[in-house]
Image (cartoon, rainbow, N blue to C red):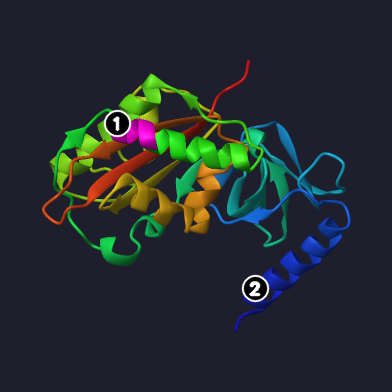
Amino acid sequence: MSKRFIILPAAIAVLFSIMGAQSKKAEFASTLEREAVVEAATLNVRTGPGMTYPIIGAEKKGAALEIIGAMGNWYLVKRRDDSIGMVSSRYVRVTKIEEADVKEGDDAGEELSGGVQAGADEELLFRLVNEERVKGSLEPFEWDERLNKAAQTKLEDMLRENYFGHNSPNYGTPFSMLKQLGITYKTASENLSKDKSVELGYEKMMGSLSHRANMMSMRFNKMGVAVGEPDDGGKKAIVQIFIEELTS
């Protein structure tokens, strides 16, 4: 085993031990986000998820970071020199999300069929997510027709092109799709699922650390949803798009 892969887990353990005495509320979560670039002129890298934690380094605008996970509004990142630390998600732009997380269980390698449906299923999914957020003392997501239309566009694209995944043959990544649709954001992510009902799809996503992290994120404040008609196997495709709005 290379030194790189020995050092990284040890470094994470040390970082968490430093954080432990100072952070009681933040919880580490896996995320679908995998890579980001720095947007601030200079971004401080800290030992924990907050401005009171010691600075252990800094990155310049345009620097690439590998995202390991998240704690609240902060990313745990690996830098180019393989050192790790935490940075505020407000000052980075996510450039890659994990494709493999979408193809779990029975959905792996499946083609997508069925139709598009708008109405009660979307409202149900929105309600289920917000009820769980309120239980977790988080602000509920705001209903946003632009994001609902974006989710609907993604669903229609998957049905038309017969694929099931984050990267579209027509729009590219979810980030590229949002840009093409004229939707601006600070950070964004996407969940996809397929199941025989909205409730089962929701439970499946809540059982996945990365999907749950999106739904329970403190960063995102808006969510768009779309649910498809049952396919030949009785499964409905579910699309969730999350954004953190740009602030002036």
Q: Main secondary structure of the magenta part?
A: helix
Spatial CA distance of label 2 from label 1 is 50 Å
The image position of residue 68, as x and y in percent, is 60, 57
Q: Secondary structure at mark 1?
A: helix
Give the residue at x 79% y 42%.
50
Give whichever of discs 2 and 1 has the lower sequence position: 2
The N terminus - image quarter: bottom right
| Neighbours of disc 1 within 10 Å: few (<14), some (14-19), many (20+) | few
Q: Taking 240 as reference, is 11 left or right?
A: right
Q: Residue furthest bottom?
A: 1
Left/right of residue 227 with respect to residue 124 in the rendered view? left
Name the residue located 61 percent from the left edge and 31 percent from the top edge: 139
Q: Position of residue 186 (x, y in %)?
A: 56, 30
Q: Amino acid at mark 2?
A: Arg
Point out the stretch of residues depicted in magenta: 120-124
Secondary structure at numbered mark 2: helix
Callout 1 amino acid: Ala
Q: Position of residue 220 (x, y in %)?
A: 56, 34
Q: Is residue 149 magenta?
A: no
Say which of 2 and 184 sits in front: 184
Image point (66%, 38%), residue name: 137
Q: Which residue is mark 1?
A: 120
Location of residue 80 (image quadrant): bottom right
Q: Which mark is residue 220?
A: none
Q: Do we see residue 108 in this rendering?
A: no
Marks 2 and 1: CB-CB under 8 Å?
no
Please name which of the two marks, 2 or 1, marks the residue nearer to the observer. 1
Q: Nearer the viewer, residue 22 or 92?
A: 22
Q: Quadrant of residue 82?
A: bottom right
Residue carrying label 2: 4
